[in-house]
Image: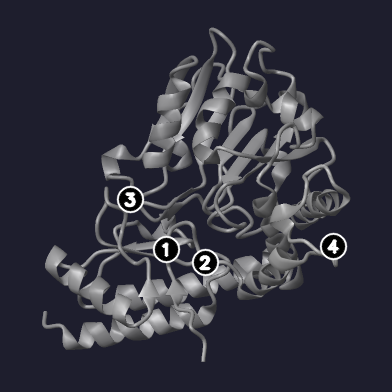
Amino acid sequence: MSDRIFNFGAGPGVLPESVLKEAQRDLWNIAGSGIGICEHSHRGKVFDKVINEAEQVCRDLAGIPGNYKVLFLQGGASLQFAMAPMNLLPKGGTADYLVTGVWSEKAVKEAKLFGTVHEAATGKGSKFTRIPAAADIKYSPSPAYVHFTSNNTIYGTQWRSEPAPPSGVPLLCDASSDIYSRPIDLSKYGLIYAGAQKNLGPSGVVLAVIRDDLVERAPKDLPVMLQYRTAVAERSLYNTPPTFGIYMMGLVFKWIRDTGGLAAMAERNEAKAKLLYDALDESKHFTVPAEAGSRSLMNVCFRGPGEEMENRFIAEATKRGFEGLKGHRSAGGMRASIYNAMPRAGVEALVAFIREFDKKEPR
């Protein structure tokens, strides 16, 4: 009998069981080297193979063009909120931001430290329950770049496709909570970045993919660790990187590849989300705040008729082996994060519990 429960936490999130089991082995002894992955030098042959394979499978999965660099960075997506404008927003320039929730608001706040920010669209008026339509987006005359957050974990909304920036303007994206959950055309982006801890691995490492022509755009008087050119020139090895996190990302990339790639992943994610949304839409107690056309396939946010019942639901769910269902502290309610590694069986079990709870609770 398994001693694991279903982890619906928003991040760090669920990881594939086969990856965890392989990591157990390699923590003790990787590749017959006699020591574990966490003990290997980042300059040695064992880790050199690990990082090279991680990058190659990452590239293969999304068909990353040759004129893009794949970087493994630190500091979380939150550091990228500052690092992107530090490198890509010139003095006197303006950056356009599409504001769809807390994380894009935080990105705006950081960017304002380095230059002018124009909010080309905001969902604040709808309490972030929907993604702006193309007609709602009003770009500035000549932005240095356009930045958006592809999936909003707190509010349960997600862009169905990328916004179209003005011609020739680089598109930047914080894709922390939905990267590699579906096919992606990296050629549409100037820079895309994601904290690993939702779909790609453990916390502590960031995947960034940047187009070659943007690498040298940064001022050269920035601190060396905050320049993309440093990470590019040193292959993400300027200093000791998060070796275990990169190793785990490599295993997750291989797991995605071996289970059908990004197209198959998208099909599974859509099917899981439909199961859960259908149950919530049929419920007599629960509602989904996000508008139908903006609903996230990664983070399903829902509310009950009152805080007392919501607390009762969360407490009972925890007893049943469902972890991480409490909503973000700023939004309340419940949230089921159904990232790539959440098995369909976990969603089916949650749906059964929701229906059971619905029946026994009086209106």
Decide: is 285 above or below 128: below
Distance of label 1 from label 4 (alpha carbons): 35 Å
Distance of label 4 from label 3 (alpha carbons): 51 Å
- The x and y percentages for residue 73 are 65, 39
**Residue visible at 63% across and 59% down?**
182
Kind of residue at badge 2: Val
Q: Which residue is mark 4?
A: 33
Kind of residue at badge 3: Thr
Question: Which quadrant, please, contains the C terminus?
Answer: bottom left
Kind of residue at badge 1: Gly
**Residue visible at 79% across and 64% down?**
30
Specify whether 39 is left or right of 286: right
Asked whether the beta carbons under mark 3 and mark 1 sit within 8 Å of each other, the answer is: no
Q: Which residue is mark 1?
A: 9
Tell me which label, 1 or 4, sits earlier in the chain: 1
Neighbours of disc 4 within 10 Å: few (<14), some (14-19), many (20+)? few
Asked whether the beta carbons under mark 1 and mark 2 sit within 8 Å of each other, the answer is: yes
| Pair 4/3: label in front | 4
Neighbours of disc 1 within 10 Å: few (<14), some (14-19), many (20+)? many
Decide: is 49 above or below 137: below
Q: Which mark is residue 129?
A: 3
Neighbours of disc 3 within 10 Å: few (<14), some (14-19), many (20+)? many
- The x and y percentages for residue 181 are 60, 60
Tell me which label, 2 or 4, sits earlier in the chain: 2
- The x and y percentages for residue 153 are 42, 53
Dot 3: element: loop
